Image (cartoon, rainbow, N blue to C red):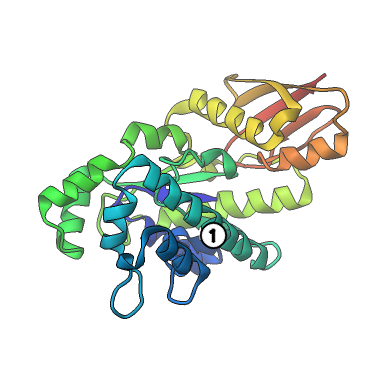
């Protein structure tokens, strides 16, 4: 599961609730800090690329100093990303591989929408709150001034962009703890059975509670996200993907080359949250998102 939300929306709070429920939470920001700690190859590579001026007196990374040189132009930013992204990706994969068998892995990624990473996950959950609430939180708990808070919010993805990426939309505009029951329902009625169905290769049985907060932009949005997941999971084997809302969920057709084996197709479809349901047909393992996919050659 991918978890994201704008600054001040309360994404980290939701991550803590999921962790208490039993999820393995992987914090992208924490990993980004780990890979540039003193003594790491990452910090050494940054210093070699951008100079010793990016280091503080105690040998730690001086982040403002790095930002002043690494974001000075597009070329510098690309060099920074070329160093950090492989390190962050490798460490993230290590954490995923180390998760206990049967774990529900939640990746907490602030810029998931901005990085167009949604199709990489079985499910994307967006935590949101209205702008005034977010500004109040940033000013009150983080000590930002109001202008800085609003500027940071404006620099991130818009609400419409997040809705387009969201399979689940959680509004966290209320008092502390008010969202916890909804997160608990999400865990019990959607995430746990979804993971169980995928592991067993079983088609989901729809559960009314699982639809709470689902598909914030309707079935057409769900169809678009399924098509994106199919293209990502199948890669070059998918010559054509078409998906549409059919009134009872989402229906899709995937055209593949004739030399793709059934076993290979089943394994890749699992990456899109689908399990076999007959010859050349796959259906959703997600109880909150009905979908049927037919494969043709």
Q: Secondary structure at mark 1?
A: helix
Pick the front one: 121 or 291: 121
Q: Could you tell me residue 10's position as x and y percent?
A: 32, 56
Say which residue appears at 67% left-offset and 63% top-offset: 97
Q: Which residue is tagged 1?
A: 87
Work out whether 291 lies above or below 9: above
Q: Is residue 130 left or right of residue 145?
A: right
Can residue 180 be seen by looking at this rendering? no
Say which residue appears at 11% left-offset and 56% top-offset: 145
Q: Quadrant of residue 130?
A: top left
Q: Residues within 10 Å of mark 1 (few under 14, many from 20)?
A: some
Q: Could you tell me residue 118's position as x and y percent?
A: 52, 40
Q: Is residue 31 left or right of residue 189?
A: left
Pick the front one: 262 or 278: 262
Q: Could you tell me residue 76's position as x and y percent?
A: 38, 47
Q: Could you tell me residue 177's position as x and y percent?
A: 32, 61
Pick the front one: 213 or 73: 73
**Image quarter of the C terminus:** top right
Work out whether 240 lies above or below 54: above
Q: Quadrant of residue 160?
A: top left
């Amino acid at each position: 599961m991918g978890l994201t939300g704008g600054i001040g929306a309360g994404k980290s709070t939701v991550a803590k609730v999921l962790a208490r429920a039993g999820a393995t939470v992987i914090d992208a920001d924490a990993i980004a800090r780990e890979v540039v700690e003193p003594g790491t190859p990452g910090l050494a590579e940054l210093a070699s690329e951008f100079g010793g001026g990016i280091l503080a007196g105690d040998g730690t990374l001086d982040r403002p100093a790095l930002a002043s040189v690494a974001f000075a132009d597009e070329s510098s930013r690309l060099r920074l990303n070329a160093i950090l992204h492989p390190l962050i990706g490798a460490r993230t994969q290590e954490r995923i591989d180390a998760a206990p068998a049967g774990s529900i892995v939640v990746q907490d990624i602030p810029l998931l929408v901005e990085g167009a990473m949604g199709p990489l996950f079985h499910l994307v959950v967006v935590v949101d709150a209205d702008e005034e609430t977010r500004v109040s939180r940033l000013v009150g708990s983080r000590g930002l001034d109001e202008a800085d808070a609003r500027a940071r919010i404006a620099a991130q993805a818009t609400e419409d962009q997040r809705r387009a990426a969201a399979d689940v939309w959680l509004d966290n505009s209320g008092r502390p703890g008010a969202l916890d029951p909804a997160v608990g329902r999400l865990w019990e009625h959607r995430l746990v059975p979804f993971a169980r169905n995928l592991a067993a290769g079983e088609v989901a049985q729809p559960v009314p509670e699982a639809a709470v907060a689902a598909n914030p932009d309707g079935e057409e949005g769900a169809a678009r996200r399924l098509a994106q997941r199919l293209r990502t999971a199948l890669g070059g084997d998918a010559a054509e993907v078409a998906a549409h809302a059919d009134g009872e969920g989402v229906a899709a057709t995937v055209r593949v080359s004739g030399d793709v084996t059934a076993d290979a197709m089943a394994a890749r479809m699992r990456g899109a949250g689908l399990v076999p349901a007959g010859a050349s047909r796959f259906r959703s393992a997600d109880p909150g998102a009905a979908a049927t996919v037919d494969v043709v050659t």
